[in-house]
Structure formats: structure tokens, C-alpha cells
Amino acid sequence: MKNVTAGLFTVLFLLGGCSSDEEQEDLGKPEIEGYVTNQEDDRILVTDPEPEDANGNGEDDYYDALWGSDAPDDVEIGQYVEVWVKEGVETSYPGQADIKEVEVQSTEAPEGADLSEDEVIRRALEEVEQDVRIIESVAFDVGEDLWRVSVITPGRDGSSYELDVEDD
């Protein structure tokens, strides 16, 4: 009986080590995660809503951004995504790279809301005419049946926008 159990364990162990083509490879940490804020042909612009201290001056004033080429057709402005790239990132601002994988994070409408977060972001971004737009925050006020979206545009002439979107 011990030999049967040991043999069965060995077979299961070996089978567990095999992987099929359908299994997703371990991609590691994504290059960027954030909101899709612009789209041109097969490219998407992803901006990270969390600022960081890139200059070492103690101020969180840099927002990572990436133009990714070869984006899947089903990715839309307003979605929150994780992006892995094929090779390195060109060090312009925003960075540029070929996309290896995009994973859309699901967002559901909060209780009492009719619109989803990605639809609200799409509507809000129609009011801001800049290529690079960073979503700082998105919040739904159930009492007012209203979404509040905070958008900034980076750079020397950067602006901050507080936009209200009515929940249909």
C-alpha cells in the first residue's frame, strides 16, 4: 500500500509541474497600473493616480504615464488596468513601450449609482482637452446622485479640474 501511495503521489507531483498553453505565464510585477485616459489607434495612455517622489525632494509630485502600443481592442478609456510590456520603456514623458499583456480590473457601480466608474471617467475626460490627463480621484455622492472626478494635467502649465458628472 505504501508503494501505491508513493507512486500516486509521484504521478500527481509530476503532473502538477506540467503546464498547459492555456495557463497564463507568471508576468511578474506590471510596468504600470492606472486609468486608461487616452486612446489612439492601437495605443493606450495609462496614467497612475498615485504620485511619487521621483526627484528625491520629498514631494509626491510625479505621476507615471505610459503610451502602450499593440493594445487589445477591448480596452477602453476610463478602465483601470495593469500593463506589462514586451521590452524596456522609452524614457520620454509619457514613457512608450510595446504591450505584452493588459489586465482590466473590474469596477462595479457603487450602491445607489447607475453609472460605472469607467463610464464616469469617460464623460469627465471629455471636458479636459489635454493629451495627458491624470485621474486623481473618483467618488460617488449617493445623497446628491453625483460623481466627483478630480483630474490634473502635468507639466509647468499643469491644471487641476474638479468635475461633477450626474448619475443618469
Image: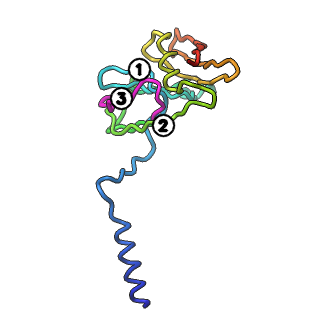
**Residue at the outermost right position:** 143
**Magenta stretch?**
69-81
| Quadrant in which the N terminus appears | bottom left
Q: Which mark is residue 68?
A: 3
Alpha-carbon distance for marks 1 and 2? 17 Å
**Dot 3: what SS?**
strand
Residue 145, by quadrant, is: top right
Between 6 and 52, the residue placed more toward the observer is 6
Residue located beneath label 2 in the image: 105
**Dot 2: what SS?**
strand
Asked if residue 71 is among those painted magenta in the image, a careful observer would answer yes
Residue 144, by quadrant, is: top right
Hey, what amino acid is under mark 3? Gly
| Quadrant in which the C terminus appears | top right
Q: Residue at x 51, y 21 (%)?
A: 121
Between 19 and 154, the residue placed more toward the observer is 19
Residue located beneath label 1 in the image: 38
